[in-house]
Amino acid sequence: MSNILLTGGLGFIGSHVFLKLHSLGFNPVIIDNLSNTSLDKINLIESITKNKIDFYNIDIADTSALESVLLRHKIQDIFHFAGFKSVSESVENPLKYYANNVSKSITFLKTISDLNIKRLIFSSSATVYGKPEYLPLDEVHKTNPYNPYGETKLMFENICKKYCLSNPEFKFISLRYFNPIGSHESGIIGESIHEQANNIMPIILKTYLKIQDAIHIYGDDYDTKDGTGVRDYIHIDDLVEGHLYAFNNLDKLKGYNVFNLGTSNGFSVYDLIKSFEKVSRKNLPVVIKKRRDGDLAEIYADSSKAKEILKWSAKKKLDDMTFSALIWADKYRQLINK
């Protein structure tokens, strides 16, 4: 099996893709500068794989170090997960996001181009669409990001689109994620709980673990079925499968390609909380707060293109997602109580 490079491979999504590739007999290699994670993640991954992993603590813009890894492992395929990921932080510090997510990725792209690496799968986001003009969102919907984070994702997509036009042999797939939640089946790794949480699931888990007093819901007066925001939550396992299906289709696809990865269903914040309360058999306190600037009322995917071309579709139900998150939270409780 071939060696595959994962940039930012110790993060939430990258680590789950690593485990899937490893289980299938591939040799995934991780580079990560630890800006969004820590070395502890290596021990957790190795406790699942029962093998040492190939990990390099380097930045994607460190050209000489990156070239050394690419040549040593004879890399021809790359999953590019590296990047800052907080929407709110990107609004507060946009230059940090443009410098890291765009400038460094350009340097990275030049490095792999110089080494004649022609296959890249990119971790993008539904935030590239901005405010929906219609729902569900398909890939032909106009792109108009409403925050710097989304802009950085779209900018790198457009850079790669132009690069593909000038380099016909280069194959690029951008996977636009909606809202991944859940954990690995082992319960050993999952979405970060200890970091400052902006997403709703870590906030639910913090409340369940009594790390914070209540779930904060930012706005219950949206024009939705129950007044709370509606999102397309997707199980991390389904998202990982989407990466595998994209990888398996690289040979037949040409140039620049983009696919939504979502369930094509919208769930409200209350739907998510009720599902978690159901699987955990616990009622959780809720506090309603005012809307946050930039939050949208409703957004969910049309993933029919991925189904038609990649032969992929999400399988997990909402209760599967919240139960998976519950298992991870209980494992996390055991770790912090040791």
Image (tube, rainbow, N blue to C red):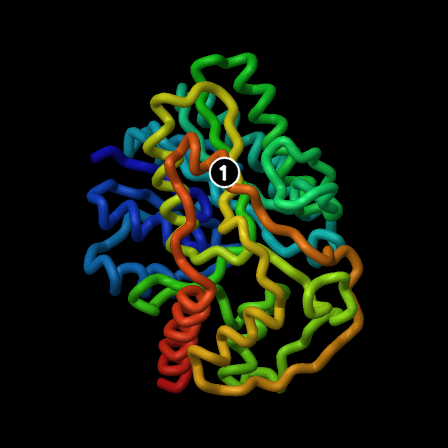
**Residue 151 image-quadrant placement:** top right
In the image, residue 4 lies at what x, y percent? 32, 37
In the image, residue 235 lies at what x, y percent? 44, 58
Camera sees residue 261? yes
Residue ID at (56%, 50%)? 178
Residue ID at (67%, 47%)? 149
Q: Nearer the viewer, residue 146 or 99?
A: 146
**From the viewer's perspective, is residue 81 above or below residue 188?**
above
**From the viewer's perspective, is residue 297 above or below residue 126?**
below
Quadrant the C terminus occupies: bottom left
Q: Amino acid at mark 1?
A: Ser
In the image, residue 69 lies at what x, y percent? 35, 36
Neighbor class of circle 1 (other Cα within 10 Å; few <14, some 14-19, many 20+) is: many
Residue ID at (79%, 59%)? 293
Figure label count = 1
Give the labeled residue for mark 1: 304
- Seen as rendered, the residue at the extreme front is 225
In the image, residue 154 lies at what x, y percent? 64, 36
Camera sees residue 195? no
**SS for dot 1:** helix
Residue ID at (41%, 45%)? 313
Q: Nearer the viewer, residue 168 or 300?
A: 300
Lateral position of residue 86 relative to residue 307, left or right: right
